[in-house]
Image: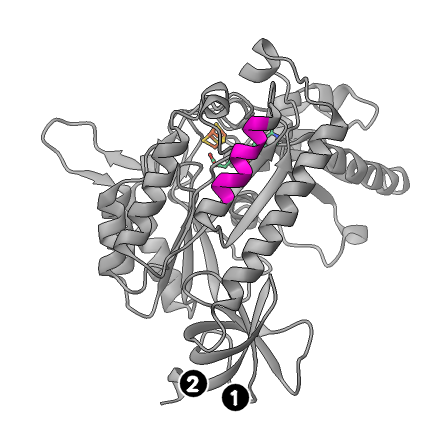
Amino acid sequence: MNFADTEVVASILVRNGFEPAGDIESADLIMVNTCSIRDNAEQRVWGRLDLFRSIKRKRPSVVIGVLGCMAERLKEQLIESDKKVDLVVGPDAYRDLPALVTAAGDGHKAVNVLLSREETYADINPVRMDSNGVSAFISIMRGCNNMCAYCVVPYTRGAERSRDPYSIVNEARDVFERGYREVTLLGQNVDSYLWTTGKEGEMKVTFAGLIEMVALISPQLRVRFSTNHPKDLSDDLLKVMALHKNICRHIHLPVQSGSSSMLQRMNRKYSREWYLDRVRAIRGYMPDCTVSTDIIAGFCGETEEEHHDTLSLMKDVEFDFAYMFKYSERPGTKAERHFTDDVTEEVKTKRLNEIIDLQNKLSAACKKKDIGKTFEVLVEGEAKKAIAGRTMTGRTSGNKVVVFESESAKPGDYVLVTIEKATSATLTGKLLINKDKR
Ligand code: SAM
Ligand code: SF4
């Protein structure tokens, strides 16, 4: 999400006459786009600000800015702290950046952290940065209304709003025509995407409808999306996915915990049974669909039994992949106001390690089952680590990374690869057909 936002920021600045600098030492404006989701994300930003300050000491005219969630959360504190940044801009105020940069350059306080109920940056065509020329992120909505007890996002990114579907389709068509072969539609809870003109009797577009509109651009364009919310994942979406081969066979469905009592404390609005039913539905419609998840270890009051419920749910589902975190208390959240962060650091670490060890085993086992199978792979580029000769890397529809040797495959090609070896993270295979060569 921050990556996509940074591309919007770059576009706003370029439109206003700014140019990217070759490196940080020659930049007149240095900004960091920030995340507040866990304390360690914020600590990394504070570290980065030390580096920026050292540059400013050498060149006092440099303007330093903090963008995004940390700007929203800490506001003027960032200007007043000993790190003394010049510019503080929240996630809904990026259009104001050119004026704020000028104000900061003139020595004025430059802060805009107003949250909006409408801003979706729909008309801004993002500048694609650090791109492999194959995959692009497209933001389809902003903010979140869910109020999970541990989460700072609703406070830093504001209320949920959906972007005009036609602007989304136009952006996807534009990147496809420029040679991209994959788009990832982004939102905190894509299942609650809903666009309507607000007038009675007029058309409504749901997420299932939107994804079909994007999939119909071309069968050569892969469509991914993130993140789904288990409480809202609908059969309508699964039916549309099953109908279109170019909608990728992968759902990221964060469970957070396998215990119903814990899920209730987290205010997730579903139970263990509901989650397992949704996974059964996914596999019923698409037996080849991979499922990945997010898990939090050591949320307030977590008992050993609740932790074991998480381990047992992981075994029941056999996730292909997981992002796993230790609970980090965030100021202002429901959990910080009403619960005690009472699981010790030692226990959190022990539980997280158990979760990671189990997931490593599950990932390895599910990749092992792929040996001998042939997958259509979208080539992304050359692999960092060569297996032999020219080693290329790409992904299956199920989002599994595949490396293979080929002298001819190019980024953006669709190839068929038969898997010969597997680790918990990567599949290695033999190129069968370069479909783009036929
Ligand atoms: N909207 C998505 C959802 O509901 O799953 C994801 C939002 S969040 C940016 C990504 C993940 O960070 C969450 O799924 C959760 O596992 C984790 N997370 C959020 N707040 C956290 C906290 N306070 N401590 C640890 N992990 C947290
Ligand atoms: Fe945070 Fe929950 Fe919203 Fe995800 S759905 S962003 S975890 S409040």
- Outermost residue toward the top in this view: 338
Res. 33 mark: none
Q: How many marks?
A: 2
SS under mark 1: loop
Q: Which numbered disc, 1 or 2, marks the residue closer to the eye?
A: 2
Expressed as whole percent of the image width and height from the top left, the position of residue 409 reads 50, 83
Residue 418, relative to residue 81: is it above or below? below
Ligand 1, seen in the image, is in the quarter at top right
**Is residue 234 toward the left or the right of residue 161 in the image?**
left
Residue 137, compared with residue 154, is above or below; it is below
- State the image coordinates of residue 137 (x, y, percent, origin top left): 46, 53
- Label 2: how many Cα within 10 Å (few below 14, some 14–19, many 20+): some
Instruction: Answer with the quarter of the image where residue 45 lies.
Output: top right
At 43% from the left and 85% from the top, the residue drawn is 434
- Residue sitting at 66 percent across and 42 percent down? 354
Q: Residue at x 71, y 43 (%)?
A: 29
Residue 96 at x, y percent in the picture = 54, 32
- Residue 86 visible? The answer is no
Q: Is residue 306 magenta?
A: yes
Q: Check if mark 1's residue and mark 2's residue have beta carbons within 8 Å.
A: yes
Locate the C terminus and report the quarter of the image it occupies. bottom left
Dot 2 amino acid type: Asn
Q: Main secondary structure of the magenta part?
A: helix
Numbered range of the magenta stretch: 305-314
Q: Which mark is residue 434?
A: 2
Q: Residues within 10 Å of mark 1 (few under 14, many from 20)?
A: few
Q: Amino acid at mark 1?
A: Ser
